[in-house]
Amino acid sequence: MRGLRSTVERLDRPSAYFSNRNKRRRPDKDQRDGDEDTNMQPEPPADDPLKDATTLYVGNLSFYTTEEQVYELFSKCGEIKRLVMGLDRFNKTPCGFCFVEYYTHQDALDCMKYIGGTKLDERIIRTDLDPGFEEGRQYGRGKSGGQVRDEYREDYDEGRGGLGRAIQQAERLREAERPDGREADYGRLR
Amino acid sequence: MADYDRRQGGGSSYNNSKKRRYNNRDDDDYDRRGPRRRYDAPPPHVRIRKQLLSIAENPMRPWHEEIQSIASLFTENWEDELLRTNFVELILQLAIEQPLKTPFLAAVVLVANTNKPEIVDILLGKLTADLESKIRQGDWRDVKLYLKLLACLHNCLDGEGVFPVLEELFSRAVDLQTASSEDTIGTELVKIILLTLPYIMVAAPNQWQQRAADLMEKTEIIASEPHALQALIEPYHPESSEENQSPSMSTIGLLQSQLQAEANNGWALPCLPRPWDFPANGTEEPPKLSGAAKHALRPITVPQIVVAGPRPLFPEIYFSVYPVQDVESVPSTATAAASLIRDALLDTINILHYNRNITARFLIEVDCYFAPRTFAARATPFDRLRDIEPPKSTWKPEDVAVDAVFSQLFQLPNPEHKLVYYHSVLTEACKLAPAAIAPSLGRAIRYLYRNIHRLDIELGNRFVDWFAHHLSNFGFTWKWTEWVEDVDSSNLHPRKAFITGAIDKEIRLSFAQRIKNTLPEPYKILIGPEQEKDVPDFKFANDQTPFATEGREIAALLKRKAPDEEIQPIIERIHALAIDNNLDPLVASTDVFVTAVLHVGSKSLSHVLAAIERTKDRLTDAGAASDAARSQIINAVMAYWSAQPGVAISIVEKLLNYSILVPSVVINWALVSYAGATRGEALAKAHVYEMVFHTVMKVTGRVRQLVQKSTEADAMVDNETRDVEVGNMRGLFKAMEDALTAWANGSKDEMLDTDGDGNSESEKLVCRWGERWLRVFRRRAAIEEAFLLEATKKATKAAAAADSAPALPGAVATEDAAIDIE
């Protein structure tokens, strides 16, 4: 309905990630890591699983950001019921995301509006409404155990372990083959 | 715009999206190779939406051009019914969502009226219906914004226009004010009346002076009388020595006197835009607005009983962080511009909470929405304002914008939205225009810092919290050197307390080493080595500590998740040892056990929560054993995490949730034990205030929830539970009152037995902290009492209504909670 649509975009809508994932599952490609801010759905459907969501997925954290830091920032939107840090599947160290659960849906929406896109530990973090944490989701789903977005990332990101892990691994392999292979053109690895 | 993409094909939205995407791709290829394809202009209703949405946003485009082009696009496509209805709906929606644009929308309507006068009738029909429903619901901001639109349209209204509605609203205000001096709806109505008048006076100049004067004569009594609740929400709490400082002005009191001055000056109101005035020497023939059709505004029904609506109403105070400067960088409180610009900005800020980026853009572009030359050029440095020649304005748009946000951040008892929203608006504004905004923020910070000793403590702590959060978004850079002389002052000094509080908050959002690197040398001693440790030392690791062996043993058992039976013998050993050493056995065992739990969970909050979860039965029993033992639980937590109070506060919060701790223990620990042990210095610590404040908010929040539920029809809460909780809350406030009064009077034992003469500098500072704390929690207590009173009234009203006839539609009693927190 036109009349209901606000004259400015709302920041407390779920990103395209959730709706896309429900439409078409592609287990080989984790779109969570994509940058898809193209949400244009006017109103979520009535049976929207996110309509009472109290949990947020928080992304683009530094691997070094602690639970306490997340608490300090996210408590500004309401008391936190539960915090689950995202861990590397293999070595159980933080891998740059977490789930924050509030007591109320409103707190979660406020967090989308006021904290998503601001900085924590000097990184712009991303928040997305989430239907709720389930056991197993705390682990990275990339081949190397971390998040998929950290596999083929070409930029050097100190807070997230430097270059993409797959790229690092490929480089290591090549370095092993050619001891003088310093000029590795990692840009071609896609 | 995205709009258009979605509605491509004039409303046939069931295009196969996949197919369309492919088509687009083909088009792109084609474009690159050959001449440009024929461009299909979007349909008129799409274009008009786009143009209305962005009206007045582009400072390079003259208003009259833009307005005329929209109006003619509209009248040329008059036959398009979709366009007509959309136009009306969008005007009304914009008026309440983007109120800075209202005068420009009105100008479009006025121009359209010269050609298609029917449009005004359609608009007024919808507008009056919406306005009446907003009045019934008590949605006073929307009422004000609709009246503003009507006021801007005054020139095409027949007869007396909006004056009859204003009169009607005023008579309700009088009834309410006569009934109770604490009424807040009446003052809100007067505010609305006063804020509507100036727009009438600029929309239809030289016609309504007498009517306005009559109305203002009547509002005078209500507006200039200080409200009964005003003393509670005063942002400053001056020391008794500076009592002669005049209190802040209420928004309506100020408005009344400003408008009086305007009336004496022929309602010049130079700041308000007059987009309906068309330049005579333009190339195009200006539209003949004066000869256009006039329309009757049907009488607006205002119910006999008006309600407070969804938002709590409180008297408001005009707050500015740029009050006394050698050059006026914001309008002085003597001019109506101060109130009118502030009002429009506050509406914008509070309405657009769902998109802080847009809010920030409006703030930065505020000069687009007021008369030309109202402000100095954007980003003019403050020092350069002095060079501006007199008739020209020295008002810095950035200062005006920042000032408006701070007035919300520092609004008592609470602003409309969570404080973090206002943080985020300032962050975005600073990101959008750092060179313009950052210096204004810097001057605001310096002003607040200079006045921190007289700021209400609740506001002082909001300042600490915002400051640290803001810096965390900008690489923690601040010119700390300018405050260096305060570093060595006593911890009781308000400025020093600000510095330590801010550094602690910065560390919590980052880490000690990082923050240390951002500070000049003299500040580095404020961050001790223990703050740089990830995990605090376990005191029982040192054999010198009493019960060291037992502490280590318990920790080891907890670590391997041993059953509770294995712990019990060690606890008993501690009891025996303590009795031998003349110590309280329960306190001793509680300290060892809690410290061991904390140590085992020291790795992260998840760890400590898991450890507490596993041991909560024993912890609960320990707390229940004696008051001293219960107090020892919080003692142990605060001691173990003393270098990282943020963690301690989180743990205490969780212990309260588990009912292992109860609120009175926390309050007693802070205001009696810890404050006593530190001879009052605890009162100067931001984290102690934070913990107490959170605890009190937890209690009041729960009481409110219970009261709310018990008034609902299908009451899930029995009155007994509610009354017990209300009693506990009152008891808590009473205990705080007693403890804090003692500190404020200097009659605290710990202060008396110092060897000084009872009049030393530090004792005075402690008394002052006591006074300031007292004020905060007296206010909180008063607010809660007011809430309870209102709830009782409502319950009686509802009961009476249930007994008699079924309630009339519109007489909604569920929404008039006068005060509500979050």
Image (cartoon, rainbow, N blue to C red):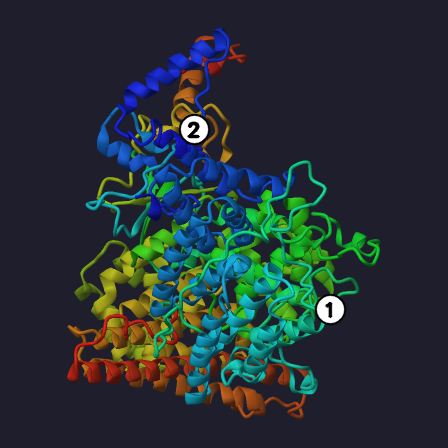
* Residue on which disc 2 sits: B42
Quadrant including the N terminus of chain B: top left
On screen, residue A150 above or below B597: above
Q: B797 or B578: nearer the eye?
A: B797
Quadrant, the C terminus of chain B: bottom left
Report the Cα–Cα distance between label 1 and label 2: 52 Å
Task: Using the image, name the chain to which the residue with label 1 belongs.
Answer: B
Q: Position of residue B689 (x, y in %)?
A: 49, 72
The furthest residue to the top: B33
**Residue closest to the eye, A17 or B9:** B9
Measured as percent of width and height from the top left, residue B318 is found at: 59, 71
Q: Which residue is mark 1?
A: B324
Q: Is residue B77 left or right of residue B69?
A: left
Amino acid type at circle 1 is Val
Disc 2: which chain?
B
Along the line of sight, which residue is nearer the eye, B482 or B806? B806
Q: How many marks?
A: 2
Local packing at callout 1 (Cα closer than 10 Å; few below 14, some 14-19, many 20+) is few
Which residue is painted at 47% across and 12% down in the image?
A: B31
**Relative vertical location of residue B548 with respect to residue B816 in this rendering, above or below:** above
Residue B62 appears in the figure? yes
In what element is the residue under mark 2? loop
Identify the amino acid type marked 2.
Pro
Sequence-first tag of 1 and 2: 2
Dot 1 and dot 2 residues touching (CB under 8 Å): no
| Residue B353 visible within the image | no
Mark 2 surroundings within 10 Å by alpha-carbon count, few (fewer than 14), some (14 through 19), many (20 or more): some
Q: Nearer the viewer, residue B767 or B200?
A: B200
| Residue B598 coordinates in the image, percent (x, y) | 35, 61
Question: Dividing the picture into quarters, in which one does residue B581 lie?
Answer: bottom left
